[in-house]
């Protein structure tokens, strides 16, 4: 059999963001370094090196409101998130007031879709018991799988 005009297509490895199953806001609160409310003032795309896959990010300028956890500077902070949802990036709307769940890496604040950011109008964060489905406590400071993928 003679095949002519055959094209071979190679596909790269797929990435996907997978959030922990049976996650709760209390677990997310325990996992992150900072939790605070803030109004998004601006979104700035930061397109990284064109030769490096997955380093594109959004920089959000956020006016800090109420601080619930961690030591967040007063005033405006910059929070980063990957552009692509496949590496757990999340989008925030300019002008909206959010309750943000954020990791601190050096001088950078970072958030991911699995962190559970939500509108601040939903009230303060739930910080109650952080039990797993088996009833055992979740260690505070545990790292999010999304953070590990995107860092």
Image (spheres, rainbow, N blue to C red):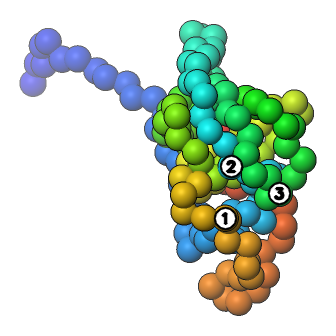
Q: Residue at x 67, y 64 (%)?
A: 124
Q: How many marks?
A: 3
Sequence order check, earlier mark of 1 and 2: 2
- Is 22 placed above or below 87 here? below
User: Label 3: few (<14), some or many (≥20) within 10 Å?
Assistant: some
Q: What residue is drawn where x is 77% and y is 46%?
A: 103
> Which of the marked residues, 3 or 2, is nearer the chain's N terminus?
2
Query: Residue at position x 56%, y 74% from top?
Result: 22
User: Residue 10 or 151: which is nearer the viewer?
Assistant: 151
Chain-order first, disc 1 or disc 3: 3
Give the secondary structure at mark 3.
Answer: strand
- Whether residue 127 sits left or right of residue 93 in the image: it is right
Mark 3 and mark 2: Cα distance apart in space: 10 Å
- Residue drawn at 23 percent across, 17 percent down: 7
Check the image and name the residue furthest to the left. Answer: 1
Q: What percent of the width, then of the height, locates residue 135?
A: 71, 89
Image quadrant containing the C terminus = top right
Give the Cα separation between the discs numbered 1 and 2: 9 Å
For the residues labelled 1 and 3, the Cα–Cα distance comes to 11 Å
Residue 81 image position (x, y, % from top left): 62, 34
x, y (%) of residue 62?
Answer: 68, 33
- Secondary structure found at label 1: loop
Numbered badge on residue 124 = 1
* Mark whose residue sits in front, 3 or 2: 2
Between disc 1 and disc 3, the foreground one is 1
Where is residue 136 drawn, in percent x and y?
Answer: 76, 86
Residue 118 vs residue 65, the one in the foreground? 65
Task: Determine the image quadrant of residue 28.
Answer: bottom right
Report if the CB atoms under discs 1 and 3 are less than 8 Å apart. Answer: no
Decide: marks 3, 2 in contact (CB < 8 A)? no
Q: Which disc number belongs to residue 69?
A: 3
The residue beneath circle 2 is 37
């Amino acid at each position: 059999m003679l095949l002519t005009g055959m094209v071979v297509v190679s596909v790269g490895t797929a990435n996907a963001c997978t959030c922990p199953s049976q996650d709760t806001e209390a677990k997310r609160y325990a996992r992150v370094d900072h939790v605070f409310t803030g109004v998004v003032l601006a979104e700035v795309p930061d397109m990284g090196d064109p030769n490096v896959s997955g380093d594109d990010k959004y920089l959000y300028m956020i006016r800090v409101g109420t601080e619930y956890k961690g030591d967040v500077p007063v005033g405006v902070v910059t929070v980063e998130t990957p552009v692509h949802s496949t590496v757990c990036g999340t989008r925030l709307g300019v002008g909206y007031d959010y309750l943000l769940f954020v990791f601190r890496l050096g001088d950078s604040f970072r958030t991911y879709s699995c962190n559970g950011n939500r509108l601040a109008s939903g009230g303060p964060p739930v910080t109650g018991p952080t039990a797993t489905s088996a009833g055992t406590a979740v260690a505070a400071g545990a790292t999010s799988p999304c953070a590990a993928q995107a860092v």
